[in-house]
Amino acid sequence: MDLERVKRKLLEAEFFLEKMLEKDRLPYGDSRNSFDNYLSAFLSASMTVRSLFHAKQNRKRNEEIKAWRDNWCGNLAPEEKRLFRFMQKDRIAEVHSTGSERTVKTDDFVPGHFYRDRSGASFMAGRPDMPPPVPPKQTYHLTIGGTEQKATEACTKYLGLLHRMVATFETEHP
């Protein structure tokens, strides 16, 4: 097993997660296409981390690593197992069929009277006796085991699981 390659793929997944978090914070602009692209790249990089848990051309070692991985996954908490399985299925759907199962919602974004960031600027004005207008902001969600959560939060938890898996393997197989 090439642990250096696994670590590079973890860094790649971190990079795309950071891009998703960045897009998630911005209320304006072409965030939907960019977010979808970053989610797809995150899913692919994180699946590569999982698939690198084998030893090329060494059947005995490969069987040992697979048994270790199956045991590690078997010891996850139920919520973690659901997340681990969901992300695998979502990556397969993203790459091979219908796309990620993420949903897009519109949440209220309350910027105050004046707001500016790199995605754009807004100035809200209205009658003093009326509440200020509230522009919509797109947010991205995944439903895992019947529970909806922000896509960035689920991806952050998943990346944490992958880091834990690699660290545990390193500790147990120096």
Image (cartoon, grey):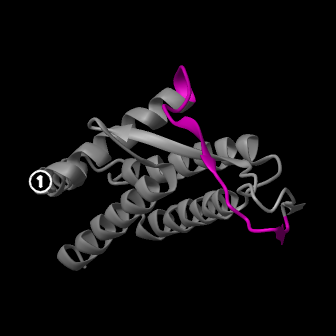
Could you say where residue 48 lies in the image, as x and y percent from the top left? 47, 49
Q: Is residue 102 magenta?
A: yes
For disc 1, the marked residue is: 71
Residue at left 47%, top 37%? 91
Residue at left 58%, top 39%? 105
Asked where in the image residue 169 lies, by quadrant, the reply is: bottom left
Could you say where residue 7 lies in the image, as x and y percent from the top left? 47, 69
Left or right: residue 121 compared with residue 108 = right
Left or right: residue 14 compared with residue 71 = right
Relative depth, front residue between 17 and 30: 30
Q: Is residue 70 visible?
A: no
Q: Residues within 10 Å of mark 1 (few under 14, many from 20)?
A: few
Could you say where residue 92 lies in the image, as x and y percent from the top left? 46, 31
Residue at left 35%, top 47%? 57
Instruction: Judge whether 97 appears above or below 56 on screen.
Output: above
Secondary element under disc 1, as helix, strand or loop, is helix
Q: Which range is magenta?
A: 95-118
Q: Is residue 19 magenta?
A: no
Q: Is residue 54 visible?
A: yes
Left or right: residue 26 compared with residue 161 = right
The residue positioned farthest toward the top in the image shown: 97
Please identify the quadrant where the C terminus is shown: bottom left
Please identify the quadrant where the N terminus is shown: bottom left
Relative depth, front residue between 109 and 15: 109
Left or right: residue 159 compared with residue 173 = right
Relative depth, front residue between 111 and 7: 111
Could you say where residue 49 lies in the image, as x and y percent from the top left? 43, 55
- Report the amino acid beneath label 1: Asn
Residue at left 72%, top 60%? 26
Relative depth, front residue between 13 and 32: 32
Asked where in the image residue 25 lies, by quadrant, the reply is: bottom right
Give the number of marks: 1
